Image (tube, rainbow, N blue to C red):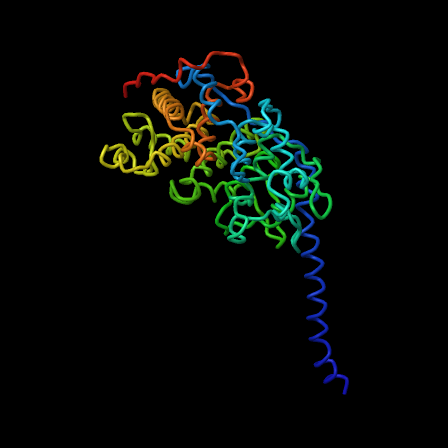
Amino acid sequence: MLAPICRWVIPPLVVVLGLVAFRLFATATAELPARDVLKAAPEPNLIAPRYDEPRVITDEQLRAVLDRVKPPMQPLKTNNLVHALRLWGPSADFGDPQIPSGREMLDYFLDDRTFRRLAGEDAPPLFYRDRDGLAVRSYDDALANRDTSSYHTDDLLATLAECRTPLATPMRLRDGEATVGQLLHDSLARFNLDRFEYEWALIAYARYVFPQNEFRNQWGERIRVDDLVAEAIGPPLGLGPCNGLHRLEGLVVLLRADEQHRALRPKTRAAILEHLHAASQLLAASQTADGYWTRRWPEGAAAAEPATANQASLHDKLLVTGHHLEWLALAPEAVQPPRETIVRAGQWLTRTLLEMDQKTLEEAYGPYTHAARALALWRSKDPYEAWKTQQPIASVLRPSPRPQP
């Protein structure tokens, strides 16, 4: 009599006990990122520029370029403020009530009161809590309110890291309080290697978490730094947001952080350098005579043919050339193309940003800030400090001679 009872009672009991054990395990592993990540780097790693090359852009030209890319207020877009904060930093103050200061731009992301003042009282919160923790309202969540949404996954977090915002920094949300550390934890807890956009998570990881070489997501999966590198190197060049160029940026930022910590495996570091060097060789081959690149740069010399290059729009030329000069400004000398390649690209960007009309520039403000930031990085100058120096700028509005290829 006992045997039949055991046959019917014990299996369900085992299943229940198994589910309880799994729940406890999942809860424990979900807490790992919070415990490990928050102690990994209270402040972001400092990723400093490497070069000061006045042939890329002179001091006078740089100030004139920066004067054209001051933060726009109208129409207000979260994506514009992300890029403006990334370019100008939280200390910028333009002395104009129509132009948001760096502090206002930072508070737009840290304090819902500032967000509502700038975005409008009817704008839904930029940050909200769901069952997985603190989340960011995405551009893809709904067709409405896209202007005030985050455009790329984890771009806000990466920007806070680039502004060297400590993890303990408080965030005043519409439904309570949080910290930047909680935003980082919940972002990494959601991370998986199969998602479409991972570039900004790599940048945030490299600045905030590295040299810790792994973390666990909310499903208990272990994400290693080698996994992140493989994810960035694996797809074809040119694939991904902004022509795949944020993947190169993420790798360079990680490489720069490793120069301080020496925590990457030699094999991993060598793989990054080889990948960047291959991209650099393609850039040397695909640069047009004028100095710009197009989205077809991975094709090498074929992309530089006039019949091919002339098909690209001005927007694409600026987007690709600015992004390339940006990651190259942080890359080691060993993976650089010939310096004249950099000079030609820098002078093309300078001429173009100075000569284009202001309306066109503001319509694509985000990509054009990458170009301005790249030029400042190649001079190792803080954009706000470079802009506020009292130098005449009228003379640089004349077209500069085109460097010979």
- Residue at image position (74%, 80%) is 6
Nearer the observer, 9 or 398: 398
Residue 337 can be seen, yes or no: no
Q: Quadrant of the N terminus?
A: bottom right
Farthest-out residue, left:
307
Nearer the observer, 334 or 400: 400
x, y (%) of residue 224? 56, 44
x, y (%) of residue 361? 42, 31
Farthest-out residue, right:
2
Q: Quadrant of residue 153?
A: top right
- Residue at image position (72%, 85%) is 4
x, y (%) of residue 148? 56, 44
x, y (%) of residue 68? 46, 25
101 horizontally vs 395: left or right: right
Residue 365 can be seen, yes or no: yes
Q: Quadrant of residue 346?
A: top left
The mark total stands at 0
99 horizontally vs 240: left or right: right
Q: Quadrant of the C terminus?
A: top left
Above or below — where is 242 with respect to 163?
Answer: below
Above or below — where is 206 with respect to 146?
Answer: above
Nearer the observer, 121 or 214: 121
- Residue at image position (22%, 35%) is 307
Q: Quadrant of residue 326?
A: top left
Nearer the observer, 4 or 66: 66
287 horizontally vs 204: left or right: left
